Amino acid sequence: MGVEKRLTSRKFLIWGILSFSLVGTGATHKTLAAAVQSPRVTVPATTPQVAALPQHTVSTMLPDTSGYVVRTVCAAGCNYKTVQSAVNGIHVDGGDVSGEIIKLASGAAFSESVSFPVFSITAGKWIIVTTDTASSNLPAPGARINPSFSPVLAKIVTATNSPAVQVATRAHHYWFVGLEIAVSPSMRLFQSGVIQIGGAETSVSDLPHDIVIDRSYIHGHPTGNIRRGIKADGVSVAITNSWISDIHDESSDTQAIWAYNTPGPILISNNELQASGENVMFGGADPNITNAVPSDITITGNHFTKPLSWFTKSASYSGPRWVVKNLFEIKNAQRVLIQGNVFENNWESSQQGFALGFSPRNQTGTCPWCATSDITVANNVIRHSASAIAIIGADTEGGPSLPSQRVTIHDNLFYDINKANWGGDGRFVQIVNPGEPSHDIIIDHNTVFHTGNILTFDGKQGSTVANFVFTNNIVAQNAYGVPGGNAALNLWVPKYLFTNNAIENMQASGATPADYPKGNFFPPAWTDIRFVDSVNCPAGAIPPNNIGICALAAMSPYIASGTDGRPLGADIKAISAATAGVVP
């Protein structure tokens, strides 16, 4: 059945049924080059719909700058003394900008809030803003910047509530590369954000478009209340190879990257992302553009983390107490690929501490089209968190929304999902349906070391999940496993498929195989599963650069026990390749 989706240049099969063609428009992070490995499982009578992949991505191929006009900015002896004056002085030739480079003096700090307006730009040309230094002084293209580059970087620093960089309505073809963009330490009580792309546009045609932020160090400061690193409400926005940190607030949600008022596409690739509220979030405010859903979002090769100096129970805690919720959350987005990332350090605080949350939210009652749909979570490491994944059906608080639908979670390694260490409940997946239920949820080939429930269901009476698949996973029974066992599955996810899972140490809880559907496995202990290192892997004592010890050993009884003939659990080799070099 030749249903095709376009994103990169490789073909692969999903469940042996749907053929997907991935076609790219430009260079992206290394993990995009490898097509997502997709689950092939025996499906129930009602075939679940697999999540659709992004249909578009964003080109990050550096343009040829031959013939570009160059403007230099420095304290003395340059064309301009301020960044804004250089932007305002952009030469217009015949009504069109035919390529401009604004070079800011290396190491210089410009205390400004700079607005980048709309210009008519010749097709294929850009306005590039960068540091005036040899390319050898910056990371190579495709490599992530870090704070050690600060001495050489030109700095745009806001000392007001306004962003340091504001990309205006309809502005387009701006490329920011090799910069430090920050909030002054003088801004302590409230600062709205470091970079703002777009404002409150009410039509797609008014949105900024074709905006690239590459190899830039974007940050607040250790004691500041800074709401977000980048507001990314534009069409074709790429944030790559950058470092975003010190984004936190004592009384409000914060995000390293946030978008709510755009149709996409958006690329977030190979970044360090540190924020206290949600490191990355889509939605959370009703879009000003009717029917806008952030779409075609690719999130690959990023390190999502909250520093332990923010954790009140850590020996390194340095105060104050920031609002902490999730590492990643979607309240309104569709066709999202989350691949090859490392998510770590999330604890119970302002919420229960789930690492990832998918919860459609009609925030103030004006977005009945808000949805979390077609979400693919593949080849990631999720660790050191109070709980793992929360999925919620349609909104019943702000106003009606569409439900979570077509969520595919496969080939991920979860470990140290641990109530004792991080608070919360130590749960793997929680599905709550307060209104119209979520549907088409596929959880396949994951390896999970957790201390709480395998699956937790709740919601409105009679609210059942259609097309639920839970196959080929390695999980722990702990105290309750799936509370209610077969009865709970029949109540909440009728016509489910729950088979070929290894459920460790069921006997210690008093449960029996009869409490679960037929076709699953019940090893008495982790050592009976036979990992490459059966001692350290379950304890979570995994060296940072050697997650391969969670792979099944050749002599494991489950080495070919998947519904597809694969080993049970995640493809650890694929995860290792996808996440190589992600953690700094």
Image (tube, grey):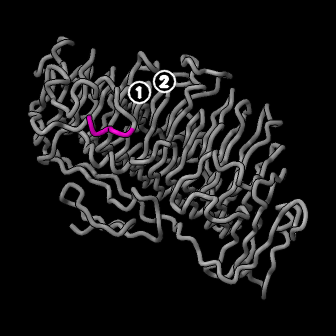
Location of residue 297 in the rendering, given as x and y in whole percent from the top left corner: 48, 56
How much space separates mark 1 and mark 2, taking CA atoms?
8 Å
Q: Is residue 294 above or below residue 133?
A: above
Location of residue 456 in the rendering, given as x and y in whole percent from the top left corner: 33, 26
Badge 1 density bin: few <14, some 14–19, many ≥20, Cα 10 Å = many
Which quadrant would residue 37 be assigned to in this image?
A: bottom left
What residue is shown with label 2? 352
- Residue sticking out furthest to the right: 76
Of residue 343 and residue 1, the one placed in the foreground of this image is: 343
- Residue sticking out furthest to the bottom: 94
- Give, as a single range, the part of the protein colored magenta: 545-549
* Quarter of the figure with the N terminus: bottom left
Does the magenta stretch mainly form a helix, a strand or a loop? helix
Determine which of the numbered discs, if any, sits on residue 387 in the image: 1
Please, what is the three-letter code of the amino acid marked with disc 1? Ser
Which quadrant would residue 240 be assigned to in this image?
A: bottom right
Please, what is the three-letter code of the amino acid marked with disc 2? Gln
Q: Residue at x 66, y 74 (%)?
A: 126
Left or right of residue 171: residue 408: left
Q: Can residue 294 be seen by looking at this rendering? A: no
Badge 2 density bin: few <14, some 14–19, many ≥20, Cα 10 Å = many
Q: Residue at x 17, y 15 (%)?
A: 511
Q: Is residue 86 magenta?
A: no
Q: Is residue 294 above or below residue 533?
A: below
Determine which of the numbered discs, if any, sits on residue 249 in the image: none
Of residue 220 and residue 475, the one placed in the foreground of this image is: 220
